[in-house]
Amino acid sequence: MPRTLHHRDFADLPALVEAKEAAGLKVSLCIPTLNEEGTIARVVSVLKAALFDEHRLLDELVVIDSGSTDRTRALAAEAGAEVILASDILPFQGPRTGKGENLWKAVYQLTGDILCFVDGDIGNIHPRFVYGTVGPLIRHADLGYVKGFYERPLLAAEGVDPRGGGRVTEILVRPLLQRFCPELAGLHQPLAGEYAARRELLEQFAMPTGYGVELAHLLDCHRLHGIGTIGQTDLDERIHRNRSLAQLGRMSGEILDAFFARAGGTGLQSGPNPQERPPMISLPEYRERFPAAAERARKTA
């Protein structure tokens, strides 16, 4: 069972920053975006004010954009984020699109020892979405990957279902984990977009370029490092846009691709997923950019 924590345990930001600095850690935040003009300015401004300007928990705040056709990039920059097109990072690797592509490229682009991810569509953004997942990694050296979890209201014609969100999790992902990887079934929100991880873990993961990336992270982390390195933090409630059934269907297909690519030992047919990027540590350009990664790669060769 993953260790379960609560965001209020890490809400003393001056103390958390002091602990970060004492440990010699650098923390980077990535917000992956595609057409988030309705929310991105507030997401960036709230997190920057609390966690970069007032308390320097974050050393970097970067929006990596998939090629938005609205004002997402302009609004994010105006709010104070560094904004980068995913296609401008490692361009010689060829064009791919999708959330997982942004996250994979974040491992190369961002320089932190801890990388934190927050989606750009959160309507009730609060600093807890960052310090709640980063804090455990600062305070607990044995943890390497921390997911957020929360209540997710579902807005429907008949009103608000306070726990109706997370449909793909409950219909698809949780049954898969209960059947084939029960140790991970205790994660409340395995597909949550709010989480933090240590660089030395993320660089080891092959990453699907689409929505299967979050499940792939968990399966690879569990396989490589065991359940003890995974934690989860209660972040209370997350309000965001609800997707259509057609969109959820496409998302489910990408999640299944990621699962089947890692299905060895489950009795299911497994094989490589052509829509995955290789572990970042396998790229010479990454090892040149991060000499410590080159040393880690040498020791495990």
Image: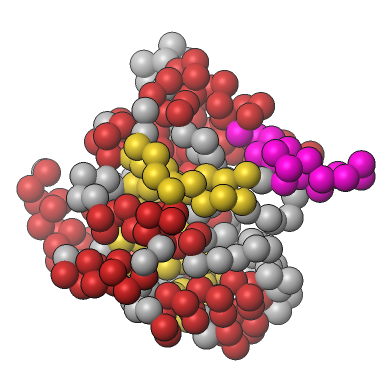
In the image: residue 120, left or right of residue 258: right
Q: Is residue 159 magenta?
A: yes
Quarter holding residue 52: bottom left
Question: In the rendered image of this protein, does residue 10 appear above or below residue 89?
Answer: above
Examine the rendering and report whether any part of residue 115 can be seen: yes
Locate residue 215 relative to residue 112 in the image: left or right: right
Identify whether 239 is placed above or below 165: below
Which of the 4 quarters of the picture holds residue 250?
top right
Residue at 73 percent of width and 55 percent of height: 241
Q: Residue at x 58, y 55 (%)?
A: 98
Counting from the top left corner in percent of width and height, residue 27 is at 32, 68
* Residue 132 appears left or right of 77: left
Residue 184 located within the stretch drawn in magenta:
no
Q: Is residue 255 left or right of residue 106?
A: right
Q: Which residues are magenta?
A: 153-169
Q: How is the image coloured?
A: secondary structure
Q: Where's residue 116, x and y in %?
A: 41, 60
User: Who's the residue at 70% across and 39% down the image?
Assistant: 163
Residue at the image point whose x is 14% and y is 62% from the top: 292
